[in-house]
């Protein structure tokens, strides 16, 4: 790797037009890399890193670099400024090295110097190993292709800058990898909010910019911010951890970002942000262990995109979900210190990569109305034309990674065209996953409304190609984010506009599943790399691009037909129902923007099925809806999706079959066959031709990339499958890889560019939308390519369960189950529909003739408000002349009377039992008497019905109930009444309640009466209805709008009949002709002149416009097949407890099509066994039996809990597909399987169920025989289907009950235990007093049960605890269900190695007492005291955890270590949870609320053994398993709790720390160790031991809590952990006291158990069933378990020291260590708290010893008191300085500095010390001879200083910090009147002190390494001052200037470290104070000029003024004398002259 750092250039010549924009190209071996340009700069700084991959070829002496500097021109060629060539021979060699090339002259074209120079640093890493020219890891960026001409801007060229095909090694691919990383792991995340904890640990900073700064770090996560303490210096050490607790869904969490910002707290200005780093939590989550450990982050300036690194920050980050273990940080301070490069969080090349997303937003369509129509209404009043459709002012808001950009607003336009480009600039590390696009409706006054939200998921529109490349070596599979041009669909709330607030508004924000199409938007995304950051956010798209995108908008016509076969399981009945099918807004009946289509079924009323549900009586005439729509043809995208889904589906079903085969323990060869079938079918599917996209017109870049990725991945899966087929040996081992393939296939099937909207089916009740379902279009799309590429359900009948919009109860009530057949295809291939169509399609125009009875005559005069001819609702007037057939259709035949057929098929058809229902109604005035209502009896819809007395039992039936009775099994009062209130204009209440209130005006009750078929008249049951046929087809009703019936009754006043006229297509089209029905029947209303033009615009409802004269299409089945269904419902398990007594009373409604049956109720159980066959005798199914066999209707099982009072509660639902037998004689039986039961989206148990559907002949003679009956009408599950059972013994060890909570406020006093399994039950003895003896007196129960041989069917084992209360009450106070009995099965004949898990105590108590005293010889007391100094328990601990530097001589002395478990002892696998004697089962009670964990009310301690009994009863029974049990009475014990330290506690105080202390509670005993709290820390070292005595088992739960000490407020609990002492005590693993490695009788490791090793060994031998151990050879040899052990073998390779005990004990201990017993250990227990039950609140390292008092006193406890820091003194003598920067000018103009030196140790800032000032240094030299003395506390073992200080003046406690020992020396310039000036500094680490130079000349800045991620500099020479003791020499000081370091001076110092003792022996004073010795410091030898002018004016004159201006002064004096002479002369001359004149001599 060759790295070129282009630093800067200087003196670039100006051009004619001003300053150039320089840009540098560096060429190495034909590879060219460029920097960015710098605008208008003659001395540019680039500081950019360019990397060249050497492709494995080392540099040689001829290697060189060419550097070209050009002036960047946007248009035209870049102009050459100068070039240079650099020879690289200095770098050649095998070492990594870097070399600066400074001031290289740039030459012009003629080779002359231009005066400009350039600075570079070149770093070289020689390649490892042989050359590898095609190294995929290299960074060979693509060639530019042109000679440096057009610098690629990438914005204009749609191809140039956006090519997504990139070699895998490039940074682009690394970028793409980063983007799509984590796609796998995120797939399985739930969408339920959970507890998470994010921990961010800020460790240290390096190279922060600025001088004398005080950095502080702020970490912002999920709306919470924490800040560190303020530190000093450019390399601060923080080591602080922050916790963020959040409760949100995983997907929301992964899009949140962590922002880490470093501020300079010194600065009060706003720009004190020094640098920041952002990363999304998803990135951290996708790292191994969901953690980023001790990585360096590169900080950058968020504002200035071009700036380089702003320093580095070292952090660790974890994301913890519930139940996650936080990973352990390894802190090796030495090795990782400076290797930043390998530890950078992101590859250095990418770290500062800017990416620009270009999002082109072209246009949108179909945006629904969002504004109020007020203005439009005003317009209408004044005669204007209203345009409702366009009442929306849309704009698009794009947000990504915290940035938001909006397009322009286009007013009043539902199909706006924006044509804008949005630039999104993203700094690489903050890669979020989704780009969010929201279409928003702008409102001038109110808040903007969101119309809809869609997401572009980066992981789907970009790919790393990583997995493909890794396995196949393929390159060029990865690509950057690209999308479109393609439409994105929006889904949200229904489109209808109302002025009221939208109840489903949330759906428009992208939360939850949208229930309706809300428009679409045409967008295109491309990605530009390395472009200059564009400052513009928006610009218009050029017209050429608009033309390019035209081809992507070409539409084709699609036809959709849906045949509704059945609508069943209705419960919300009432008004008539219809269904609407729409795709986009085509077919939406409330949307007037599309022309009306036949997209709704006719309104129908629901009929009761005689048992529980309602259904729509469509019989053999199925409603059909057809619609045509126009979309882009994207079959080239959807074909591959369907093909891959087809593969995945086959693989999934084969995999499921294989898994259930394994579960059912099938023979190996059968499994191998299934496995081979799976592999072969997969290979066959993949080798089929794959639909390719070549030749299609509207292909996007993403299409080609995804195709490439798919083909490569499929090829890879095929090869892997072939390889597996040849190599695999174990079927089970291959499952994970096969599941991985399935995941891969499902990932490949995702199609981001799916612009075809989903088909949406709505159920409409009256005019209100009630429930919906979304069917992805590709599932029903027909494709001509191949059968596999058509949708899974194209032209096939599928079952769809509709959902309520935004259903909060999640399917508790199901709106409807639909069987529907949908076909969607291009109208070009609509003929293909014929092959899918079943039945005959007929199209009718329809109207109703209405008549009323007036004065005994039928006629039209009595029709009030009704028309003579109308539609089905009776509201719209119709005439025959109104109807015109649509184009392509013509009438066939005349109008004829055609009565509604469904009235002929009675509701009870096909039933053997039926329940008739009628509602009795009463009304009153509020507060009055109840009287019969005017309609005394109605049906459920409120329509008039005959009174019960008029119901006659129909022919062929007989009453089963003697009389009508009130149905009390509903939400009603005790007489069956429910109450309501009528609010006008309604005539009946909308809702009913069970309790009567004064204001209620109506009440009703449901009367039911059962009837059954009369077997005697079975033949006549198929009675003819021909008697009705000959009538005129009238249907009668008592009042208009009521339910119609055939027979005329005396009360009828209204009648109607249906007229229909058939239409036929004018050409022969077959079934496809229905697609020609586009538009409505031409309803020509203008014919009817008599009533005037119908121009009065009445407000028409949607139905009037849409439904009145749309033709009614129906599909007529002439042949009906009768089937017979048998449902075998055997049992259920783990249902929810809904009653207060912890159980439910479950029963099941089983529904199949329009019939349902109910099982019997099983009382008080969560694991009911019904063992019942439900027989549906006759079920009519229309359509070909073959298609039914391929895709049978589902059987739906709904489980309810029967309640005596009130409504039965819903337990859950399960769906199963029946096995179809078209030939009943076939000998195949259905197999019972477990189907999951779900409730509210959660698992709620399983049900064991099977069903078979048999095609029956006329007489039903071919049906299998009926199964045997258990009771009348209760058929059992027949043999052959029911599980095969075997007599099995279940032995129960019932040891005892613990922690039983009160039941009904009274404590549980005398409980007993009931165990139920497989219908058998056994009860234990009663415990007389639970408080005194919580164990059962006799512990073993035995029961014989018939259990299934197949484990798959085994029932649950239920434990119930009942309390024996006064007056014979025996309530159930707790229960527990055990599912998997497999783990308790055993072979009774194999004697295990352990005869029985006997309790140690019972054996130990028999041990001889006299030996238990351990004599402690008090030998060598002096030596022990000395040793204590060097070796303590902590030495042992640190030696065990591997921190050898902290344990001194411990290991060398050969002492033993202990085992440190990083988890609880119970979780160590080899100790079997310490439940080898008995398990603990939690007992539950009552109704589980929403919480996942129902209330635990106690624990049962016990165990089970299950084994088969011989079939022959004469054979002897196998031996019992539980025998020789220990005594179950209470034991008194001593408990010692050793708390070592806590780790990573959750902070409780505002400062992000806590003051932890320990609280221990054991039943009533509480130790609160509040006085010994550890202030201000999250990792306290406690080192405490507590001793308690207790009685087991009553006081078994030891609770250790950590609290946070608060002086003023309540102490808060951090977390707690609970240890079950009883398990430790009973376990045979010896967990009551771990055994050490050595037997010591003195020293720190003195033996602490009660028994010596030899006694322990005897006990182990006894309960392992061995002979007692035999000692021989004077204890040097022991025979144990049939093997000899010798002392030599035990002592081999061990250092024998003076503390060891006698030989036989050592040998016995050696044997014990091989027996799998618990060793001496420290366990790490996780602390939990109640407010976040499953998230770790920290860890506690500790252990517990339990000693029974019956065995005598235990050994001495360990002393684990923490270590204390030692006092040290650092003495620094500052001798001289040299070459200090001269910072000032003196009055006389000389450069000078008044130098002084300041020094301190970080952490002890208050002990800063300064030298005196060396004034007026003219050459940077200063002489000081000054001593600094810094005392500090130091832990030699840990190499850290301990600083205790108060953080703030108001702090109560001193906080203890541990920081590395460092010294900071600064040079300052003294100013008297202004602030002193800072000149430079040096920072020295006392452990890695840079070795000083001996002379000032050799002292250079290079001695201090520059900390850079990319410079491979050789490490500086360092040594530890603690080892050297003292060092003297010259150190350089430097200062930052313009981003680089300059030398600020050199300091000569002596550093010396002395400990407290040495400091007393060799004292020394500060400065030159007394005692001035060791060494004595003389006064500095300063020149006379060194003084302060202000205080010494005379000296100033003498030394400064006189010296400098001496000659000037002398000259001035001479001049003055001369002037004086001249003045005197002039003065006296006239006098002399006049004298001469007057008195001439």
Image: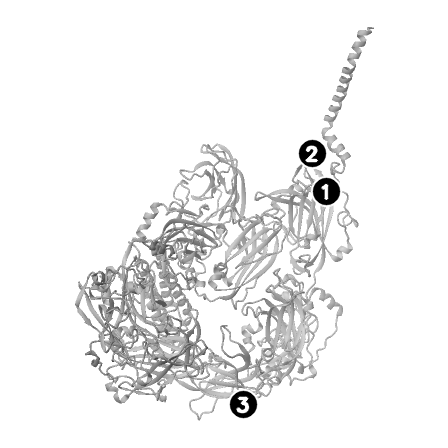
What secondary structure is marked by label 1? loop
Q: Reading the chain from its start, which is encountered first: label 3 or label 2?
A: 3
Q: Reading the chain from its start, which is encountered first: label 3 or label 1?
A: 3
- Answer with left or right where residue 650 lies relative to residue 1446: left
Residue lying at the far front in this picture: please name it.
Answer: 855
State the CA–CA distance, disc 3 to disc 1: 98 Å
- Taking depth in this image into account, of 787 and 993 the one nearest to the observer is 993
Image position of 1973 with respect to 14: above or below: below
Q: Residues within 10 Å of mark 3 (few under 14, many from 20)?
A: few
In front of the other: label 2 or label 1?
2
- Taking depth in this image into account, of 723 and 380 the one nearest to the observer is 380
Q: Residue 1787, labelled with which disc?
A: 2
Task: Please provide percent x and percent y for residue 320.
Answer: 52, 64
- Answer with left or right where residue 1149 lies relative to residue 856: right
Label 3–label 1 contact, CB within 8 A: no
Q: How is the image coloured?
A: one colour
Check the picture and name the quadrant holding the C terminus: top right
What secondary structure is marked by label 3? helix
Residue 1666, quarter of picture: bottom right
Residue at image coords 58%, 66%: 1738
Task: Please provide percent x and percent y for residue 716.
Answer: 37, 61
Residue that mark 3 sits on: 1368
What secondary structure is marked by label 2? loop
Task: Please provide percent x and percent y for residue 2004.
Answer: 72, 30
Q: Residues within 10 Å of mark 1 (few under 14, many from 20)?
A: many
On the question of residue 486 being in view, the answer is no
State the CA–CA distance, disc 3 to disc 2: 110 Å
Q: Residues within 10 Å of mark 2 (few under 14, many from 20)?
A: few
In front of the other: label 3 or label 2?
3
Residue that mark 1 sits on: 1813
């Amino acid at each position: 790797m060759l790295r070129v750092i282009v630093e800067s250039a200087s003196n670039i010549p100006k051009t004619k037009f001003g300053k150039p924009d320089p840009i540098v190209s560096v060429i190495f071996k034909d590879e060219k890399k460029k920097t960015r340009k710098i605008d208008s700069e003659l001395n540019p700084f680039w500081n950019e890193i360019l990397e060249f991959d050497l492709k494995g070829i080392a540099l040689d002496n001829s290697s060189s670099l060419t550097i070209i500097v050009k002036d960047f021109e946007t248009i035209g060629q870049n102009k050459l400024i100068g070039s240079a060539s650099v020879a690289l021979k200095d770098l050649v060699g095998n070492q990594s090295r870097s070399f600066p090339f400074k001031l290289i002259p740039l030459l012009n074209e003629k080779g002359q110097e231009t005066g400009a120079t350039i600075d570079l640093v070149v770093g070289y890493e020689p390649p490892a190993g042989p050359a590898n020219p095609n190294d995929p890891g290299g960074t060979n960026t693509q060639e530019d292709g042109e000679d440096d001409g057009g610098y690629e801007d990438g914005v204009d060229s749609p191809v140039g800058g956006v090519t997504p095909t990139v070699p895998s090694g490039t940074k682009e691919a690394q970028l793409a990898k980063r983007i799509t990383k984590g796609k796998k792991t995120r797939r399985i995340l739930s969408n339920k909010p959970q507890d998470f904890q994010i921990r961010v640990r800020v460790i240290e900073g390096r190279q922060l910019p600025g001088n004398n700064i005080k950095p502080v770090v702020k970490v912002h996560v999920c709306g919470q911010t924490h800040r560190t303490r303020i530190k000093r210096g450019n390399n601060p050490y923080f080591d602080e951890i922050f916790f963020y607790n959040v409760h949100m869904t995983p997907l929301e969490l992964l899009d949140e970002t962590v922002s880490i910002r470093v501020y300079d707290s010194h600065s009060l200005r706003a720009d004190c942000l020094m640098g920041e780093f952002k990363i999304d939590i998803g990135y951290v989550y996708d790292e191994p262990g969901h953690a980023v450990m001790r990585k360096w982050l590169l900080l950058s300036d968020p504002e200035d995109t071009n700036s380089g690194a702003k320093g580095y920050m070292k952090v660790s980050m974890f994301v913890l979900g519930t139940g996650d273990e936080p990973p352990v940080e390894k802190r090796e301070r030495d090795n990782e210190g400076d290797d930043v490069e390998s530890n950078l969080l992101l590859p250095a090349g990418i770290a500062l990569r800017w990416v620009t997303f270009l999002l082109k937003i072209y246009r949108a369509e179909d945006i629904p109305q969002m504004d109020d129509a007020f203005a439009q209404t005003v317009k209408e009043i004044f005669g204007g034309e209203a345009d409702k459709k366009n009442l929306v002012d849309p704009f698009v808001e794009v947000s990504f990674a915290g940035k938001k950009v909006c397009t322009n607003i286009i007013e009043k336009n539902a199909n706006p065209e924006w044509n804008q480009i949005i630039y999104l600039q993203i700094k690489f590390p903050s890669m979020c996953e989704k780009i969010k696009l929201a279409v928003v409706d702008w409102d001038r006054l109110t808040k903007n409304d969101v119309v809809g939200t869609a997401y572009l998921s980066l992981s789907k529109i970009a790919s790393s190609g990583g997995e493909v490349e890794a396995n196949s070596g393929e390159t060029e599979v990865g690509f950057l984010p690209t999308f479109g041009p393609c439409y994105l669909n929006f889904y949200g709330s229904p489109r209808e506009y109302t002025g009221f607030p939208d109840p489903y508004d949330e759906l428009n924000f992208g939360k939850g599943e949208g229930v309706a199409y809300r428009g679409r938007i045409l967008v295109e995304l491309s990605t530009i790399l390395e472009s200059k950051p564009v400052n513009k956010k928006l610009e218009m798209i050029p017209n050429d691009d608009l033309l390019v995108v035209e081809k992507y908008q070409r539409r084709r016509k699609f036809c959709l037909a849906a045949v509704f076969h059945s609508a069943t399981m209705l419960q919300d009945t009432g008004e008539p129902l219809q269904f609407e099918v729409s795709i986009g807004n085509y077919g939406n009946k409330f949307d007037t923007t599309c022309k009306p289509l036949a997209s709704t079924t006719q309104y129908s009323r629901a009929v009761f099925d005689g048992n529980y549900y309602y259904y729509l009586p469509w019989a053999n005439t199925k409603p059909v809806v057809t619609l045509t729509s126009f979309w882009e043809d994207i079959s080239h995208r959807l074909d591959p999706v369907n093909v891959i889904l087809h593969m995945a589906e086959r693989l999934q079903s084969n995999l499921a079959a294989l898994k259930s085969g394994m579960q059912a323990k099938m023979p190996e060869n059968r499994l191998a066959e299934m496995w081979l079938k799976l592999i072969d079918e997969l290979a066959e599917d993949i080798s089929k031709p794959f639909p390719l996209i070549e030749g299609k017109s509207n292909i996007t870049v993403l299409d080609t990339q995804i195709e490439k990725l798919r083909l490569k991945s499929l090829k890879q899966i095929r090869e892997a499958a072939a390889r597996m087929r040849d190599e695999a040996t174990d079927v089970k081992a291959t499952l994970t890889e096969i599941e991985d393939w399935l995941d891969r296939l499902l990932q490949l099937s995702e199609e981001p560019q799916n612009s075809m909207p989903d088909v949406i089916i709505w159920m409409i009740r009256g005019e209100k939308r009630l429930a919906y379902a979304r069917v992805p279009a590709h599932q029903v799309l027909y494709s001509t390519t191949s059968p596999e590429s058509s949708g899974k359900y194209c032209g096939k009948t599928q079952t769809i369960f509709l959902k309520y919009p935004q259903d909060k109860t999640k399917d508790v009530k199901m709106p409807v189950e639909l069987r529907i057949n949908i076909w969607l295809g291009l109208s070009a291939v609509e003929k293909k529909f014929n092959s899918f169509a079943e039945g005959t399609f007929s199209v009718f125009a329809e109207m109703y003739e209405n008549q009323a009875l007036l004065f005994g005559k039928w006629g039209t005069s009595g029709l009030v408000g009704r028309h003579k001819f109308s539609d089905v609702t009776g509201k719209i007037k119709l005439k025959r002349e109104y109807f015109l057939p649509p184009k392509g259709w013509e009438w066939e035949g005349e109008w004829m009377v055609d009565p509604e057929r469904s009235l002929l098929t009675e509701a009870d058809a096909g039933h053997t039992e039926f329940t008739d229902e009628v509602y009795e109604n009463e009304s009153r005035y509020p507060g009055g008497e109840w009287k019969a209502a005017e309609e005394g009896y109605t049906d459920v819809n409120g329509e008039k019905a005959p009174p019960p007395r008029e119901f006659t039992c129909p022919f062929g039936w007989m009453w089963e109930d003697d009389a009508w009775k009130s149905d009390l099994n509903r939400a009603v009062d005790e007489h069956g009444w429910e109450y309501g209130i009528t609010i006008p204009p309604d005539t009946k209440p909308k809702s009913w309640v069970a309790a009567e209130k004064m204001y209620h005006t109506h009440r009703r009750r449901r009367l039911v009466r059962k009837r059954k078929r009369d077997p005697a008249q079975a033949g006549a049951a198929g009675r003819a209805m021909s008697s009705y046929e000959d009538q005129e087809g009238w249907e009668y009703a008592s009042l208009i709008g009521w339910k119609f019936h055939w027979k005329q009754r005396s009360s009828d006043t209204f009648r109607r009949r249906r007229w229909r006229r058939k239409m036929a297509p004018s050409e022969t089209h077959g079934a496809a002709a229905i697609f020609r029905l586009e538009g409505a029947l031409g309803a020509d209303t203008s014919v009817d002149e008599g009533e005037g033009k119908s121009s009065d615009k009445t407000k028409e409802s949607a139905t009037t416009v849409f439904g009145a004269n749309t033709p009614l299409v129906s599909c007529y089945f002439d042949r009906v097949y009768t089937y017979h269904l048998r449902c075998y419902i055997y049992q259920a398990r783990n249902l929810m407890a809904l009653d207060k007594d912890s159980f439910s009373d479950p029963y099941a409604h089983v529904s199949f099509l329009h019939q349902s049956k109910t099982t019997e109720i099983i009382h008080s159980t969560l694991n009911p066994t019904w063992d019942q066959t439900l027989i549906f005798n006759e079920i009519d199914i229309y359509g070909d039996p073959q298609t039914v066999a391929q895709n049978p209707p589902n059987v739906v099982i709904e489980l309810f809990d029967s309640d005596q009072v009130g409504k039965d509660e819903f337990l859950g639902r399960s769906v199963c597909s029946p096995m179809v037998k078209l030939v009943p004689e076939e000998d195949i039986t259905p197999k019972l399987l477990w189907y999951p039961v779900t409730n509210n989206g959660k698992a709620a148990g399983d049900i064991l169920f099977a069903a078979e559907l048999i095609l029956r002949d006329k007489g039903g003679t071919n049906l299998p025989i009926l199964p045997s009956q258990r009771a009348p009408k209760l058929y059992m599950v027949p043999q052959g289907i029911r599980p095969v059972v075997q007599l099995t013994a279940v032995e129960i060890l019932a040891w005892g009950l613990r922690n039983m909570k009160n039941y009904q406020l009274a404590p549980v006093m005398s409980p007993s235990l009931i165990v139920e399994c497989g219908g058998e039950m056994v009860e234990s003895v009663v415990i007389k007093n639970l408080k005194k003896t919580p164990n059962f007196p006799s512990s073993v129960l035995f029961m014989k049960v018939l259990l299934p041989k197949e484990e798959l069917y085994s029932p649950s084992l239920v434990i119930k605890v009942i309390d024996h209360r006064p007056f014979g009450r025996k309530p159930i106070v707790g229960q527990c269900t055990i599912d998997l009995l497999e783990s308790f099965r055993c072979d009774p004949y194999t004697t295990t190695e352990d005869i029985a898990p006997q309790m140690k105590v019972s054996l130990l108590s028999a041990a001889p007492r006299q030996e238990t005293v351990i004599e402690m010889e008090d030998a060598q007391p002096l030596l022990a005291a000395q040793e204590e100094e060097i070796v303590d328990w902590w030495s042992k601990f640190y030696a065990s955890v591997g921190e050898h530097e902290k344990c001194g001589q411990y290991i060398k002395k050969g002492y033993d270590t202990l085992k440190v478990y990083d988890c609880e002892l119970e979780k160590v696998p080899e100790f079997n949870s310490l439940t080898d004697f008995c398990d603990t089962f939690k007992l539950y009670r009552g109704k589980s609320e929403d919480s996942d964990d129902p209330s635990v009310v106690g624990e049962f301690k016990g165990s089970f053994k299950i084994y088969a009994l011989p079939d022959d009863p004469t054979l002897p029974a196998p031996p019992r398993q539980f025998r020789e049990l220990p005594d179950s009475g209470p034991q008194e014990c001593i408990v010692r709790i050793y708390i070592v330290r806590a780790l990573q506690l959750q902070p409780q105080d505002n400062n992000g720390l806590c003051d932890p202390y320990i609280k221990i509670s054991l039943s009533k005993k509480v130790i609160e160790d509040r006085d010994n709290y550890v202030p201000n820390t999250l990792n306290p070292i406690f080192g405490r031991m507590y001793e308690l005595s207790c009685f087991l088992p009553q006081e078994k739960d030891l609770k250790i809590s950590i609290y946070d000490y608060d002086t003023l407020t309540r102490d808060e609990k951090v977390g707690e952990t609970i240890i079950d002492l009883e398990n430790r005590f009973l376990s045979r693993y010896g967990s009551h006291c771990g055994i050490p490695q050595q037997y010591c009788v003195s020293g720190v490791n003195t033996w602490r158990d009660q028994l010596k090793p030899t006694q322990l060994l005897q006990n182990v031998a006894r309960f392992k069933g061995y002979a007692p151990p035999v000692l021989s050879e004077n204890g040097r040899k022991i025979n144990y378990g049939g093997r000899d052990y010798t002392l030599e073998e035990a002592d081999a390779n061990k250092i024998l020291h003076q503390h060891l005990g006698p030989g036989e004990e050592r040998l016995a201990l050696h044997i014990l260590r091989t027996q799998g017993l618990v060793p001496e250990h420290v366990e790490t227990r996780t602390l939990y708290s109640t407010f976040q039950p499953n998230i770790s609140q920290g860890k506690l390292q500790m252990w517990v010893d339990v000693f029974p008092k019956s065995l005598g006193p235990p050994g001495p406890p360990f002393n684990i008191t923490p270590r204390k820091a030692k006092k040290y003194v650092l003495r620094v003598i500052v001798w001289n300085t040299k070459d200090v920067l001269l910072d000032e000018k003196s009055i006389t103009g000389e450069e000078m500095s008044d130098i002084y030196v300041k020094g301190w140790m970080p952490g002890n800032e208050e002990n800063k010390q300064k030298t005196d000032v060396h004034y007026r240094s003219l050459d940077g030299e200063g002489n000081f001879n000054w001593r600094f003395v810094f005392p500090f506390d130091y832990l030699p073992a840990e190499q850290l200083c301990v600083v205790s200080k108060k953080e703030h003046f108001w702090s109560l406690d001193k906080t203890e910090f541990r920081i590395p020992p460092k010294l900071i020396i600064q040079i300052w310039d003294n100013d008297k009147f202004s602030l002193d000036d800072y000149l430079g500094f040096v920072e020295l680490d006392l452990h890695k002190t840079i070795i000083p130079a001996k002379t000032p000349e050799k002292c250079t800045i290079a001695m201090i390494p520059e900390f850079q991620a990319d410079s491979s500099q050789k490490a500086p020479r360092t040594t530890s001052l603690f080892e050297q003791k003292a060092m003297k020499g010259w150190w350089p000081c430097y200062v930052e200037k313009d981003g680089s370091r300059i030398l600020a001076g050199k300091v000569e110092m002596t550093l010396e470290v002395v400990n407290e003792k040495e400091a007393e022996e060799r004292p020394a004073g500060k400065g030159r104070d007394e005692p001035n010795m060791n060494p004595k410091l003389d006064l500095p030898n300063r020149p006379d000029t060194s003084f302060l002018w202000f205080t010494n004016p005379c000296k100033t004159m003498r030394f400064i003024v006189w010296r400098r201006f001496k000659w000037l002064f002398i000259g001035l004096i001479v001049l003055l004398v001369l002037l004086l002479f001249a003045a005197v002369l002039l003065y006296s001359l006239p006098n002399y002259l006049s004298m001469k004149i007057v008195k001439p001599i």
